[in-house]
Amino acid sequence: MLKHELTEQVDGHVLRVQEENLDALTVLEARLLVEQLVERGVIIVVFEMTAVKVIDSSGVAIIVSLFKRLRALGGAVRVARVSGQLKDIFAMPGSTRALSIFLTGDEALKGF
């Protein structure tokens, strides 16, 4: 079961992931949550990852997949509060070029 907190804000939703490991199982649950939001018309989602220490390739792949899906709908997936291994992964050339990374969830929602 994915430990998380979902907050609805005026400009979008912030999904605060409260897991240390974002792997195939936990990220699948996150994807299902985002897909339920999309069905309700939500097109802007911020993954706030303060607690996340490790993310595997399936975690990155699903976040990128959700990014592409929401972008096609005129929305966005943004990432906030990343550190350590996550920051290195999201900074890799070509892996997530268009994925914006922010200091906070609130900052990620500004200006959209």
Image: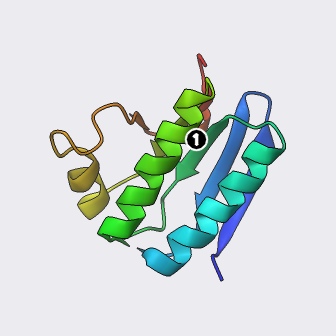
Residue 93, image x and y in percent?
15, 40
Extreme residue toward the right, this view:
40
| Quarter the C terminus occupies | top right
Amino acid bearing label 1: Gly
Q: Nearer the viewer, residue 97 or 51?
A: 97
Q: Residue at x 34, y 31 (%)?
A: 98
Extreme residue toward the left, this view:
93
Which quadrant holds residue 74? top right
The way the protein has been coloured in the rendering is rainbow
Query: Which residue bears the numbered disc 1?
Result: 105
| Quarter the N terminus occupies | bottom right
Q: How many marks?
A: 1
Residue 89, image x and y in percent?
24, 54
Left or right of 72 in this view: 37: right
Left or right of 86 in this view: 67: right
Q: Residue at x 70, y 60 (%)?
A: 33
Left or right of 91 in this view: 32: right
Q: Residue at x 71, y 42 (%)?
A: 13
